[in-house]
Amino acid sequence: MEGFKNRQITFLAQLVLVTLVLLGIHSYLLSYFATNIVFFFPVWHIYVFHFIVTILIYSIINYRFSLGKKSIFNLFMVMTLLKMIFAILFLLPLLLSDFENKQPDVFNFFIPYFMYLFLEVYALTNFLKKA
C-alpha cells in the first residue's frame, strides 16, 4: 500500500503543476487572441472538470494495481469510455442551448481533454514499467 501512496502523491503533484501551467497558458492565450468571443463555460470550469476526472481515473487504476491486479488495460479502457461519457454530460448544457457560437467552447474543452488523456497514459505506463 506504500507504493499506492507514493504513486498517488507524485501524480497529484504532477497533475496540480500541469493544471496550473495549462490553465495559465490557456487563460493568457484567450485573453490575448479571443477578446471578442463570449464563452459558455469559464475556462477554470473546464480545468476543474479535467482535474477531477483525471485524478479519479488514476486513483481507481492505481488502487486496483496496488491490490495486485497487474492487468489493468481493460479497466483503463472502461475508465476512458466513462471519461468520454462524462465529457458529453459536461458539454450537454452547451450543446442543448441556443448559444450562437459553440465551436470555441468545444475547442476550449477538447484541447485540454487530450492533454490530460496524454498525461494519464504517460503516468500509467510509467508506473507499469516499474512494476
Image (cartoon, rainbow, N blue to C red):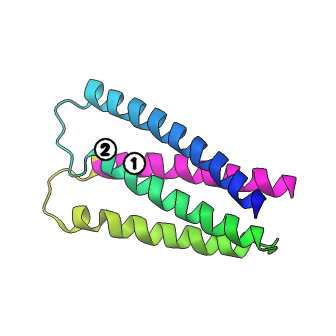
- Residue under the point 71% across and 56% down: 124
Residue sitting nearer the eye, 83 or 5? 5
Which part of the image, by quadrant, shows the C terminus?
bottom right
Q: Is residue 1 magenta?
A: no
**Other residues around mark 2 within 10 Å, as few (<14) / some (14–19) / many (≥20):** some
Residue 19 relative to residue 36: left or right? right
Q: Quadrant of the N terminus?
A: bottom right
Residue at image mark 1: 47
The secondary structure that dominates the magenta segment is: helix
Which percent across, then down, holds residue 50? 45, 54
Q: From the top left corner, tell me how far across and down residue 36 is, in percent.
A: 16, 32
Which amino acid type is shown beneath numbered disc 1?
A: Tyr
Identify the residue at horizontal 77%, vertical 50% (top origin): 126
Marks 1 and 2 close (CB-CB < 8 Å): yes
Considering only vertical position in the picture, is 24 above or below 120?
above
Of residue 127 and residue 42, the one placed in the foreground of this image is 127
Q: Residues within 10 Å of mark 1 (few under 14, many from 20)?
A: many
Q: Amino acid at mark 2?
A: Val
Question: As drawn, is 61 to the left or to the right of 101?
Answer: right
Q: Residue at x 25, y 46 (%)?
A: 42
In the image, the segment drawn in magenta is 105-131
Query: Circle 2 is placed at which residue position?
Result: 43
Kind of element beneath mark 2: helix
Residue lying furthest front:
2
Q: Which mark is residue 5?
A: none
At 69% from the left and 51% from the top, the residue drawn is 123
Q: How far across and down, in percent of the image, does residue 23 sit?
A: 40, 37
Distance from the alpha carbon under mark 1 to that under mark 2:
7 Å
Task: Residue lying at the far top in this picture: please name it.
Answer: 32
Does 10 appear above or below 58?
above
Residue 127 located within the stretch drawn in magenta = yes
